[in-house]
Image (cartoon, rainbow, N blue to C red):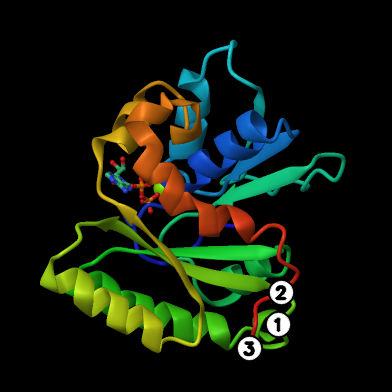
Amino acid sequence: MVLNAKGGCGKSTISTNLASYFAFERQQKVVMIDFDPQGSSMAWLNVRGDREPRIQGLPAWEKSVRIPTSVDTVILDTPARVQGQELSQLVRRVETIIVPVLPSPIDMRAAADFMKALLLNGKISRKQTKIAVVANRVRENTLIYQSLQAFLKSLKIPFITSLRDTQNYIHAEQQGLGIFEMPPSVVWQDLEQWQPLLRLRSKRSFPD
Ligand SMILES: Nc1ncnc2c1ncn2[C@@H]1O[C@H](COP(=O)(O)OP(=O)(O)O)[C@@H](O)[C@H]1O
Ligand SMILES: [Mg+2]
């Protein structure tokens, strides 16, 4: 599940790219569930051609959906502003939570509050759910990126990787693809940055 109460931090981008990774790179049966009425992940799927490995999409913003069990991977994209009961209900059903955070003072402040709320959740405090933060749309060698790194390291949540700000995500999105399905000569730097995130799946739990 990709989650953060803030809009525009990259939840849908990370969700669609994860879905593409498991479907294309690992040849898995993938279901993507979109809880956001904006429907960005579903729109991405609609653009995705029939020639690409199939990903099943389930819109979940109007009525609740049953999470399929006979598939390999389920990716959950979520809306901004989830909190309270809604947040606990979503979290209850997942194995791993990825929280993208942008290098901006407003986003960092919002993220700090959101993490506090998340860590109060019973399932997470009992370490039944893996959780990781990802810095997104990063421009290296900027002061704000340095502050973001310091901030993320200070959290009680593992800071797993940084994804750079690049048009590659936009170009992939326009074609209903993930960066994994783009020419490696174009996206090799991005593929490297994704590695720690992809390895989360095989790890059983986080170190303390
Ligand atoms: N690493 C990135 N580099 C460049 N653009 C990005 C990156 N991540 C996200 N974006 C762009 O930022 C915008 C917001 O991202 P999105 O994934 O829709 O956020 P959210 O789902 O959290 O609201 C989109 O236009 C997306 O294409
Ligand atoms: Mg979104």
Label 1: which secondary element:
loop
Amino acid of disc 1: Lys
Q: Do the residues labelled 3 and 1 touch (CB within 8 Å)?
A: no
The answer to whether one can see residue 105 in this image is yes
Q: Do the residues labelled 2 and 1 touch (CB within 8 Å)?
A: yes
Residue at the disc numbered 3: 208
Mark 3 CB within 8 Å of ligand 1? no
Amino acid of disc 2: Ser
Q: Pinpoint residue 104: horizontal percent, then vertical percent.
A: 20, 69
The answer to whether residue 20 is left or right of residue 66 is: left
Q: Dot 2: few (<14), some (14–19), or many (≥20) neighbours within 10 Å?
A: some
Q: Pinpoint residue 3: horizontal percent, then vertical percent.
A: 50, 62
Locate the C terminus by quadrant.
bottom right
Disc sitting over residue 198 in the figure: none
Residue 42 vs 163, above or below: the answer is above
Disc sitting over residue 205 in the figure: 2
Amino acid of disc 3: Asp
Q: How far apart are marks 2 and 3 (CA)?
A: 9 Å
The answer to whether one can see residue 59 in this image is no
Locate the N terminus by quadrant.
bottom right
Residue 117 vs 134, above or below: the answer is below
Q: In which quarter of the image is residue 154?
A: bottom left
Q: Pinpoint residue 158: horizontal percent, then vertical percent.
A: 51, 77
Q: Residue furthest right?
A: 70
Label 2: which secondary element:
loop
Label 3: which secondary element:
loop
Q: Quadrant of residue 27?
A: top right
- Mark 2 or mark 1: name the one nearer the start of the chain: 1
Residue at the disc numbered 1: 127
Q: Which of marks 3 and 1 is in front?
A: 3
